[in-house]
Image: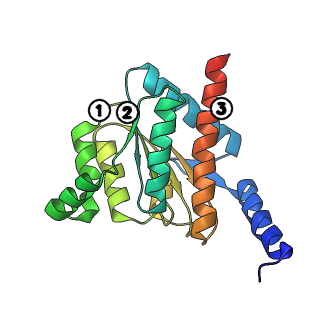
Amino acid sequence: MITQEDVTHYFEGLGHLYRSLEVNNQEGISLNFATGIDQVMNLALKTHESGHKLMFIGNGGSAGITSHMAIDYWKNGGIRSMAFNDASLLTCLGNDYGYEHVFAKPIEMHAQPEDLLIAISSSGKSANILNGVKAAREAKCHVVTLSGFSPDNPLRRLGDVNFYVPSQAYGYVEITHLAVCHSILDMACELKKK
């Protein structure tokens, strides 16, 4: 039976992650959390204002986050955004090119210079996410990453801004990634009201 102590321990652990989340830029230089949020918020707004778009990619639970965020960013934030999670798209491209290319191929087709890719992966090691980032870089897009698990995962070095959650637990990593994405949007919405 779950006790109050078990529940308290879970949420205290989750709360601790927000204080221990690591942020760095592409050169590996550490940024404080607020600076990382501010940089991505301003980049997202600038991307939209210059006529460009945000693209979100992720697998599994991270795919759910990308769909949620793409909708919220354009509906609530008025920021052009999209996610490549359509079942027909994924199965077609997975069948024709291999699952490792299901994000790279649509990015190659739809990305334009100065677009922004937000790549979310709990492990930071998924080949299709890494290939998507590579395709975005080749298209001269900006990149933001959110990862977890191993501190030396390859994804956390590939973005202009990289958020890393130091946890091995999917739930903790995914909840933290969702909260980071939502905080960027919510603060952008507040800024636009001023």
Q: Amino acid at mark 3?
A: Met
Would you say 110 lies left or right of 28 here? left
To which residue does mark 1 refer?
112
Q: Position of residue 179 (x, y in %)?
A: 63, 49
Q: What is the quadrant of the C terminus in the image? A: top right
Judge whether residue 29 can be spotted in this image.
no
Residue 83 lies in what quarter of the image? top left
Q: Which comes sooner in the sequence, label 3 or label 2?
A: 2
Contact, mark 1 vs mark 2 (Cβ under 8 Å)? yes
Amino acid on which disc 1 is placed = Gln
- In the visual, does 134 lie left or right of 193? left
Q: Quadrant of the N terminus?
A: bottom right
Instruction: Determine the residue positioned at 42% across, 66% down.
Output: 125
Relative height, residue 9 to residue 193 (above, below)? below
Residue type highlighted by circle 2: Asp
Q: Which quarter of the picture shows residue 166?
A: bottom right
Q: CA distance from mark 1 to mark 2?
A: 6 Å
Of callouts 3 and 1, which one flags the residue occurring earlier in the amino acid sequence?
Answer: 1
What is the spatial separation of the Cα atoms under label 3 and label 2, in whole angstroms? Answer: 20 Å
Which residue is more in the foreground, 172 or 4? 4
Residue 115's disc is 2
Callout 2: 10 Å neighbours few (<14), some, many (20+)? Answer: many
Q: Can you give x and y, in whole percent of width and height, for residue 2 in the image?
A: 77, 79
Q: Which numbered marker is on residue 187?
A: 3
Distance in Å between CA atoms under marks 3 and 1: 26 Å
Residue furthest out toward the bottom? 1
At label 1, counting other C-alpha atoms closer than 10 Å, the crowd grade (few under 14, some 14-19, many 20 or more) is some
Residue 76 vertical position relative to residue 102 in the rendered view, above or below: above
Going by the picture, which residue comes out furthest to the left? 96
